[in-house]
Amino acid sequence: MMSDLQELYQEVILDHNRRPRNFRALDDARKAEGYNPLCGDRLTVYLRVDDGVIKEATFQGSGCAISKASASLMTESVKGKTVAEAEALFERFHRTVTASPDAPVEDLGKLSVLAGVRQFPVRVKCATLAWYALRAAAEARGDVVSTE
Amino acid sequence: MTSGTAISAQRTTPLDVAAVRQDFPILRQRVHGKPLVYLDNAATTQKPQAVIDRLVRYYTEDNGNVHRGVHWLSERATDAYEAARDIVRRFLNAAESREIVFVRGTTEAINLVAQTYGRTHVGAGDEIVISTLEHHSNIVPWQLLCEEKGARLRVIPISDSGELDLDAYQKLLGDRTRLVSVVHVSNALGTINPVDEIIRLAHRRGIPVLVDGAQAVAHMKVDVQALGCDFYALSGHKMLGPTGIGVLYATSSLLEAMPPYQSGGDMIRSVTFEQTLFNTLPYKFEAGTPDISGAIVLGTAIGYLTQVGLDRIAAHEHELLEYGTDALSRIPGVRLMGTAKQKAGILSFVVDGVHPHDIGTILDREGVAIRTGHHCCQPLMHRLAVPATARASLALYNTRDEIDALAAALGNVREVFA
């Protein structure tokens, strides 16, 4: 099998696909749906934010291994971060998965396992779907909060 | 035609797939270091050299606008454009060339009917009948029309194997049914619908029928007069021709009575600021400069299909379908979707525990091109209770070796996701 496939489907990713972490709905939380009309992947991201800090992040939905593993890893990595920090992490993550194949991989902790996506440009949408939903979830309530 | 002699033998002899493959230059490519195995023909087919050459020749020798100039090139382009219309007429066995309207593709053909025939004949409380197997292009135009008119969309259910429930269909036909619009061959499952029976039942009540033939015309003989359909829609690029050209067939009596679709040049007889007289058929429905080269090259594609022989193509693809059905059925964890008795060359499947997109990526690395997703049939996916499927779709140039490559690549999928 070719090495770029092995790099894409690393054991960590397959594990998060098989046993997604934080795979549940949160009552009374900020939420937003990420939908990729091209492939039908659909994820809902739930956020419990307290004083600008993400206390809890969960998700539900269906999608390919990449989108599910990415969502699972994301919920782990944003917990305890401020919304602004999570947004900054998304930007770094997005840079990583869209970088040219020979660029060095930034250290993003566990999220770095998704760097293999850069070899597969059509799969970038899968890897970033949950992050867009996270951003939307964070912003949606943010608007409400700002008017109160 | 480049290798015409190799394939123009008796119709009774089987298709010489090696000779056919020689005609398709794109198939000689390697993908990720592996021979290209192109199994996404329901999305679009590859083009034979004759088609590619004709396109180049048109712009090298024939380019001029049609129905306008008195100069030599305009006449040349017009002659070729109208000759292509007659090639389509013969191909579909339509009664008259003026029943062949060039459009951009099946989607535009259906929209044309919805916006002209539909808007004149469908009113509040009326009904349009489609089926669960429809592509979004044969759902959404009717939905929009129903919304505008206060009409209702009725849907023929299917069995688990992907066959239309004809009893339910009969019950759906009523006094308020204004049109039936069904797919000839399902792009997602390969089901060949009994359109002759569907038309017969509708006509008994005087209801016209549109048949979406996008997935049929490159794979089986279609005779619109034998079928008795009122409208037949097709896309050039799914039948070895270029993108951007398609055909709406409609009986001349219907076309005569229909209002124009788009308006502008070429579709008019005379224009004053007070009044416009519309052109005769089919020009009434071809506003603006048409896709002249597309139509002409579509004619070349039809010539190629006819020369190879649609009966022979159908037999070849059917044999491959059986071989592929058998091969995929043997792979543990693979489940075929769509097992209708009458099926065209489409193998839609899911693999336990693996999303179709991951299948698609892994197969691509083996040079195997398939489609993964909902195939623009979200209501059908909902009915089948899957978010998506992987789909291998066959054409005349596919081989048993390619089915073997597909099966072997599916072995890799199981390896990665073990």
Image (cartoon, coloured by chain):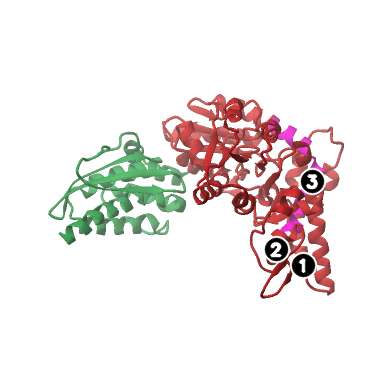
Picture colour for chain A = green
Asked whether disc 1 touches disc 2, contact meaning CB atoms under 8 Å apart, the reply is yes
Asked whether disc 1 touches disc 3, contact meaning CB atoms under 8 Å apart, the reply is no
Left or right of residue B109, residue B361 in this image? left
Q: Which mark is residue B94?
A: 3
Residue for badge 2: B290
Left or right of residue B297, residue B144 in this image? left
Residue B231 spot, x, y in % from top left: 69, 45
Instruction: Kindly report the secondary structure that dominates the magenta region of the rendered protein.
Output: helix
Give amino acid for label 2: Pro
Q: Residue furthest left?
A: A51
**Residue B24 visible (yes or no):** no
Q: CA distance from mark 2 to mark 3?
A: 21 Å
Asked which quadrant contains residue B219, the reply is top right
Q: Residue at x 63, y 54 (%)?
A: B116
Give amino acid for label 3: Ala
Left or right of residue B335, residue B19 in this image? right
**Magenta highlight range:** B294-318
Q: Chain of mark 3?
A: B
Which secondary structure, mark 3?
A: loop
**Front disc: 2 or 3:** 3
Is B342 covered by the magenta stretch?
Answer: no
Q: Residue at x 58, y 34 (%)?
A: B189
Give amino acid for label 1: Val
Q: Earlier in the sequence, mark 1 or mark 2?
A: 1
Q: Quadrant of the C terminus of chain B?
A: top left
Q: CA distance from mark 1 to mark 3?
A: 23 Å
